[in-house]
Amino acid sequence: MFNAKNICFAHVAYQMQARYVLRDAGIASTEARDLATMKAALATADVLVVSGLWRTEMLAAAPNLRFIQSIGAGTDQFDRQALAARGISLASAAGVNARAVAEHAMALILAMARRLPEARDNQAKKHWRGMIGDIAAREDELGGKTLLIVGMGRIGGRLAQLGKAFDMQVIGVRANPAAGLNGADEMHATADVPGLLPRADFVALTCPLTPETTGLINAAGFAAMQKGAYLINCARGRVVDEAALVAALQTGQIAGAAIDVVYEEPLDQASPLWTLPNAFVTPHTGGETRKYEDNVLDILLENLKRLRAGGSLVNQVVP
């Protein structure tokens, strides 16, 4: 049984504490926008709500910490063994942005099919592009195209629904194919990805970062893809071999890529991805929504109630 006394909300931009105060939950709270402020707050906090600001070395500054609520669905930034050794529970915010990320992935698919990045670039140059005679170079329709979704959890399942609404054929990949189709026309294991890549017009990544998915899409994978295919990455940057991605785009091995995540964020100013005409980059905003803070707080407050009762957590990662 655990009764929280002081919560630290740590995020560079999100209005977590401001939204929390409106709940009148009766637990003291502080806000941190940077590492130094978070370190100072951890001297007294027993609950930390955080995502990108977390560093494992912060454990030394947190003598009272008992519970971490991740602001994001991903938890690969947390050392689970170190937390378990300290008796600190961890829960993710899995599902909190499933609709938003799926919609973002669908928007990226549409953007590439309809050549919207090019249109925006032409607008900036005040250039009115004429009609295109070359059929292969024109905008395209999604109906009848094959969408391969790697990661068929809540985000992937929602993306499958959206793909089907556009009359796409959806192939799903998940760690446990026996868990069901979740909206896809067929389901396969992660190990089957290399053999599935040649079938796809769009390869959408919505999977967690695990040892099995790290570097999953590599040079061999790009070589296996159709030359007219597109990569859509709304998972984690390290699911893709970034050097191989750049090479595939530069040589025309694939038609293009629309990515919301990169290997190291923010994207290095020297990266070719900034200027490649067949690359479309969004700054890891796929999960952002006007309801995000409140969605996370719903999970946090439910988990604090469960901790008081000694029960298991919503999206429990470390007991």
Image (tube, helix red, strand yellow):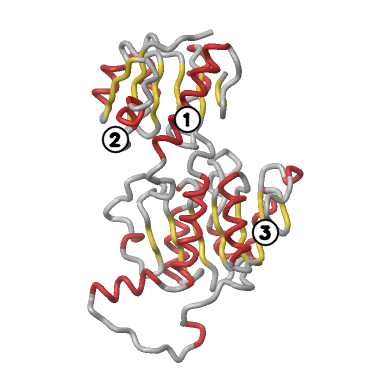
Asked if residue 99 is positioned above or below residue 277 in the image, the reply reads above
Dot 3 lies on which element? strand
Residue 127 horizontal side relative to residue 203, left or right: left
Q: CA distance from mark 1 to mark 3?
A: 33 Å
Q: Which residue is mark 1?
A: 298
Q: Are marks 3 and 2 in contact (CB under 8 Å)?
A: no
1 or 3: tag closer to the N-terminus: 3
Asked if residue 104 is positioned above or below residue 209 in the image, the reply reads below
Count the marks. Answer: 3
Q: Quadrant of the C terminus?
A: top right
Q: Can you give x and y, in whole percent of width and height, for residue 293 in the image? A: 39, 36
Q: Residue furthest right?
A: 178
Q: Report the mark closest to the observer, 1 or 3.
A: 1
Residue 280: quarter of image: bottom left
Q: Are marks 1 and 3 in contact (CB under 8 Å)?
A: no
Q: Amino acid at mark 3?
A: Ile
2 or 1: tag closer to the N-terminus: 2
Q: Which mark is residue 171?
A: 3
Residue 46: quarter of image: top left
Q: Amino acid at mark 1?
A: Asp
Q: Report the mark closest to the observer, 2 or 1.
A: 1
Q: Which mark is residue 12?
A: 2
Q: CA distance from mark 3 to mark 2?
A: 37 Å
Dot 1 lies on which element? helix
Label 1 Cα neighbours within 10 Å, binned few <14 / some 14-19 / many ≥20: some
Dot 2 lies on which element? loop
Q: CA distance from mark 2 to mark 1?
A: 20 Å
Q: Are marks 2 and 1 in contact (CB under 8 Å)?
A: no
Asked if residue 9 is positioned above or below residue 260 in the image, the reply reads above
Label 2 Cα neighbours within 10 Å, binned few <14 / some 14-19 / many ≥20: some
Q: Can you give x and y, in whole percent of width and height, for residue 134 in the image? A: 47, 89
Q: Amino acid at mark 2?
A: Val
